[in-house]
Image (cartoon, rainbow, N blue to C red):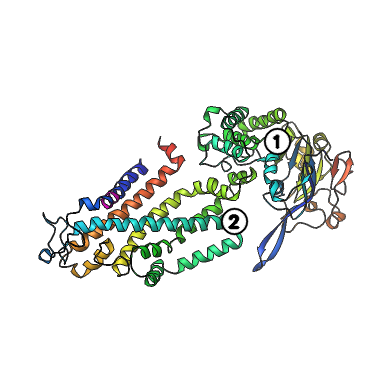
């Protein structure tokens, strides 16, 4: 039941984050952007404001609830883009080999050599801040991990007897990739994708923290942390709650990835039953 | 020869190994000029030590590696062009050595058997269903196990699935690459008997590749013995086993463990030393460094594969010397 526990805990945390994001307009206490009231500035957590208020007197709880939408959108969409790019390149490179493999491997090494955050910063600098450019910047810059994994898996799987058997039976290259190779490399890819989702959420936080992501006054967990850093000694709740939100969401995604890997492996299902 | 199912004419597969930066590119002559034919309904045994090119030959016939030279003809058609890949698939199939690596762990038996049928245009669901169930029954599996995954089967059962997959398109020729060497000894006889039954029921021709003469002796009509990419002797089953003319064939036969054969008589026939590297094969007859009959001519001149009797050929300068 080891896979089961992490699946349920991870799924629960991620599910909670998703639920909060979806229900944000109904469960917030005040408007996260407009309900500024300097009379309420920097009130510690208490009965009226469960997570306290920021320097403009906005409710931290409501801002975190709305920030979930941005963090999850960024995490999921950018990681889908990364996985699609990485798996397509890696799988074809590993299976076909030759000049295409050389090209893809070179490109992957290039991407790994440039820190992806620097790359994303450069893209953000060109496109300007905002959610769309954030998605483009994060969705195009960290596919190298899933590409490496997919390539290595394709290389080792393509010499397996069942792949040869499929070729002998007349399967085309695409059919072999989809039916023989891809299902057998899902485990590590899912783990990489969910880990990457956490990474993308952190990258969003970083970019927003650096002022290149979501612009104030709109709330994202990263931009909230960024604004809170000056008051970390005087009003720690400003940074603690967005930090915890990031922490639990990323933790949940990692646990979910582990759990999914276990149940997606038919052999481990047999072992448990 | 026109009625042959498979004809190989001077087939060679050379691999380029090494790189320009590390000691230069060399040609590894895995298969070096093989001429063979297989007739419908016949079983050809292909024997040789590991590394002699048996499996490469199989892959070349299946079109998985490109021949360096020579021709492969299937039912009179020369292979090579891509469009007849599907046609080839319906004519030649292969049973693999390792039943653990040769089945997709994420496909049920049903998918493994039904997908090729769909791919080859059997659209009718009921017919696919019937053929899958029929094939499972033929290879001795229970059709109600069709929705199980490979890991739920034992090694012998997996090999039965592998055989079912090879036969599902109703091919005429099946290449069995070491079909039993990965199995427990107790299972081997069952699988060999199954292969023989299916051969008779379905009118199949086989190429059984093995390093184990005992297996080949049991199943083959004709036998070809390979050494370092070349055929050193071929002929009918009886000629090869009762009147072997190449010293390498004699050495292989002497190496069959058999409590009823007197070991003293065969001890001096055993080959000494290791198989030479295919990267740097000995000049002349490839076998001469290990050969008990070695003479000076062997180191300089490669003997041709020439007939001794009708259908029995050996590549040895001393092919006429018996015993």
Return the chain for callout 1.
Answer: B
In the figure, B144 relative to A140: above or below?
above
Magenta stretch, overall SS: helix
**Do marks 1 and 2 both belong to one polypeptide chain?**
no
Quadrant of the snapshot with the N terminus of chain A: top left
Q: Is B56 part of what is drawn in magenta?
A: no
Viewer-proximal residue, A138 or B23? A138
Q: Quadrant of residue A4?
A: top left
Q: Quadrant of residue B1?
A: top right
Which residue is identified by label 1? B215
In the figure, B1 relative to B127: above or below?
below
Report the residue at 68% width, 52% height from top: B65
Q: Residues within 10 Å of mark 1 (few under 14, many from 20)?
A: many
Q: Secondary structure at mark 1?
A: helix
B226 displayed left or right of A254: right
What count of labels does the image hold?
Answer: 2
Q: Is A19 part of what is drawn in magenta?
A: yes
Which residue is identified by label 2? A96
In whole angstroms, how far apart are the C-alphas of marks 1 and 2? 37 Å
Foreground disc of the pair 1, 2: 2
A27 displayed left or right of B1: left
Residue A236 x, y percent position in the rendering? 18, 64
Residue A62 x, y percent position in the rendering? 20, 57
Residue A115 x, y percent position in the rendering? 41, 68
Q: Quadrant of residue B42?
A: top right
Return the chain for callout 2.
Answer: A
Residue A44 x, y percent position in the rendering? 13, 61
Region of the chain picked out in magenta, as a range: A16-21
Viewer-proximal residue, B8 or B211? B8
């Amino acid at each position: 039941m080891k896979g089961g526990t992490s699946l349920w805990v991870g799924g629960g945390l991620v599910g909670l984050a998703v639920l909060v994001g979806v229900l944000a307009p109904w469960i917030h206490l005040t408007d996260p952007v407009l309900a500024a009231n300097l009379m309420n500035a920097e009130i510690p957590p208490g009965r009226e404001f469960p997570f306290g208020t920021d320097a403009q007197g906005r409710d931290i709880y409501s801002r975190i609830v709305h920030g979930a939408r941005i963090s999850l959108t960024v995490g999921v969409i950018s990681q889908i883009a990364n996985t699609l790019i990485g798996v397509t390149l890696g799988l074809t490179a590993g299976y076909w080999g030759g000049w295409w493999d050389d090209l893809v491997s070179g490109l992957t090494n290039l991407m790994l050599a440039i820190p992806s955050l620097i790359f994303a910063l450069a893209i953000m600098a060109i496109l300007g801040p905002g959610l769309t450019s954030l998605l483009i910047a994060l969705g195009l810059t960290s596919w190298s991990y899933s590409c490496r994994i997919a390539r290595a898996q394709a290389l080792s799987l393509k010499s397996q007897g069942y792949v040869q058997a499929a070729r002998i039976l007349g399967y085309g290259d695409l059919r072999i990739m989809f039916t023989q190779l891809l299902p057998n490399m899902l485990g590590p890819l899912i783990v990489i994708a969910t880990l990457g989702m956490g990474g993308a959420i952190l990258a969003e936080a970083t970019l927003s923290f650096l002022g290149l992501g979501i612009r104030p006054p709109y709330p994202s967990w990263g931009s909230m942390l960024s604004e809170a850093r000056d008051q970390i000694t005087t009003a720690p709740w400003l940074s603690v709650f967005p930090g915890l939100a990031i922490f639990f969401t990323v933790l949940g995604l990692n646990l979910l990835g582990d759990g999914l890997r276990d149940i997606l492996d038919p052999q481990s299902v047999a072992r448990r039953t | 020869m026109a009625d042959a199912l498979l004809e190989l004419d001077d087939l060679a597969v050379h691999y380029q190994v090494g790189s320009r930066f590390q000691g230069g590119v060399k040609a590894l002559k895995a298969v070096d000029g093989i001429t063979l034919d297989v007739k419908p309904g016949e079983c050809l045994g292909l024997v040789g030590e590991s590394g002699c090119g048996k499996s490469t030959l199989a892959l070349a016939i299946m079109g998985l590696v490109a021949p360096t030279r020579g021709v492969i003809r299937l039912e009179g058609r020369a292979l090579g062009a891509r469009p007849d890949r599907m046609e080839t698939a319906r004519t030649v199939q292969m049973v693999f050595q390792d039943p653990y690596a040769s089945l997709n762990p994420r496909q049920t038996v049903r998918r493994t058997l039904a997908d090729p049928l769909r791919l080859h245009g059997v659209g009718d669901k009921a017919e696919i269903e019937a053929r899958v169930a029929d094939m499972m029954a033929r290879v001795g599996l229970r059709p109600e196990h069709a929705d199980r995954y490979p890991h739920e089967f034992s090694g012998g059962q997996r090999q039965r699935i592998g055989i079912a997959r090879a036969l599902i398109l109703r091919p005429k020729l099946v290449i069995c690459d070491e079909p039993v060497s990965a199995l427990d000894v107790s299972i081997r006889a069952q699988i060999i008997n199954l292969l023989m039954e299916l051969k008779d029921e379905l009118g199949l021709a086989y190429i059984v590749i093995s390093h184990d003469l005992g297996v080949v002796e049991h199943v083959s009509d004709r036998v070809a013995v390979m050494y370092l990419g070349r055929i050193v002797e071929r002929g009918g089953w009886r000629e090869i086993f009762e009147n072997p003319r190449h010293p390498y064939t004699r050495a292989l036969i002497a190496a069959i463990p058999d409590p009823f054969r007197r070991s003293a008589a065969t001890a001096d026939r055993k080959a000494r030393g290791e198989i030479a590297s295919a990267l740097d094969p000995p000049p002349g007859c490839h076998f001469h460094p290990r050969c008990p009959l070695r003479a000076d001519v062997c180191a300089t001149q490669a003997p041709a594969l020439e007939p001794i009797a009708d259908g029995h050929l050996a590549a040895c300068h001393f092919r006429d010397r018996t015993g």
